[in-house]
Image (cartoon, coloured by chain):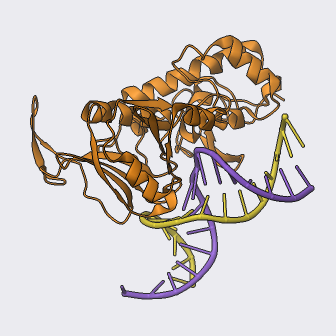
Chain colours: A orange, B yellow, C purple
Amino acid sequence: MPELPEVETIRRGLLPKVRGRTIADVVIGDRKVLKSPPERLAASLAGRSIVDLRRRGKNLIFDLGRQRLLFHLGMTGQLTFRDPGIEDGGFVRHPTTGLQRSRQHAPDKHTHLQIFFEDGTAVLFRDIRKFGKVVLFEADEDLLRHLQGLGMEPFSEDFVWKSFWKELSRRRVKVKSILLDQGFVAGVGNIYADEALFEARLHPERKTEGLSRAEAKRLFAAVPRVLQKGIVLGGTSLRDYVDSDGEKGSNQDELRVYGRAGEPCPRCGKTIVRIVVGQRGTHFCPRCQKKPG
DNA sequence: AACCTTCCCTGATGGC
DNA sequence: TGCCATCAGGGAAGGT
């Protein structure tokens, strides 16, 4: 599932390929994921140039000058670049490493939006479960209104201990739940929440009001650390996630607890367990992440 | 405010 | 081309 590291990896891969490019045409697939009327999307996007590609939490935002095109990838969303001059899944000549297999894929029944440039290359939005969304905003202030509920952005100047502690103390919820709350820290999803809690050695069902400053500080440090690791490794590909070239990330091999129920804890060897917290599968080490009682 | 349930959606999986 | 139930989950919505 695309969380901050996956969306950031897509952004970095896509940016050099789309910046400065002019949209020639768009092709609409299933309109259910398009939160703006397809006719307006098509009419508004044609002729626009892509000035920048930004990210806020798990949202990817195309800056089109005045307009903003927002993608949220939901559970299974993919945003890839496709060059029709290259065979899908075939071999391409890589500038430094020689021949390399192309992972780009042709549009299929799950491709809901294709943004074509003048030379025939395109950005494809594909989403099997259709939990993703595409929204067009006419101006930046409309986008900001849409994003106003989001919390601190990791790696930005907003992400400071004072705010983290203040917000954490204000709320009275399970620590796993607050990590998943996009109004607290933007961009953390189920995988990185479990990883951060393991890193901080906190039981996912600990209540926020019961955390000591030292414990909260561990969490404050762990969140950007696990996210950064995810970015460095190109994201976590458990099932559907691929980057803008259609390539899988490698952070799935480095996960400490997520999806590892029944396996030994990498820190102490005790068996990792899986419980449900807030309707979400939650993985932790019962020895390293004790619930004080 | 916190907490719970339901909904959206498809593909993988396992039982029979 | 077997059929059906279950599960995965981000986020919005609605209820308690």
Q: Position of residue A191 (x, y in %)?
A: 54, 39
Q: Position of residue A293 (x, y in %)?
A: 84, 29
A118 up-or-down from A202: above or below: below
Q: Position of residue A245 (x, y in %)?
A: 27, 42
Give the left or right position of residue C10, taking residue A235 as reference. Answer: right
Residue sitting at x 36%, y 66%: A109
Residue sitting at x 29%, y 59%: A107
Quadrant of the rendered image containing residue A108: bottom left
Q: Is residue A194 visible?
A: no
Q: Looking at this view, is A222 or A93 the one in front?
A: A93
Q: Position of residue A129 (x, y in %)?
A: 49, 59
Give the left or right position of residue A230, taking residue A19 as reference. Answer: right
Give the left or right position of residue A202, taking residue A256 as reference. Answer: right
A252 up-or-down from A25: above or below: above
A236 up-or-down from A76: above or below: above
Residue sitting at x 57%, y 24%: A153
Q: Looking at this view, is A204 or A2 the one in front?
A: A2
Q: Is residue A237 visible?
A: yes
A117 up-or-down from C3: above or below: above
Quadrant of the rendered image containing residue A23: top left
- So how many labels did they put on this image? 0
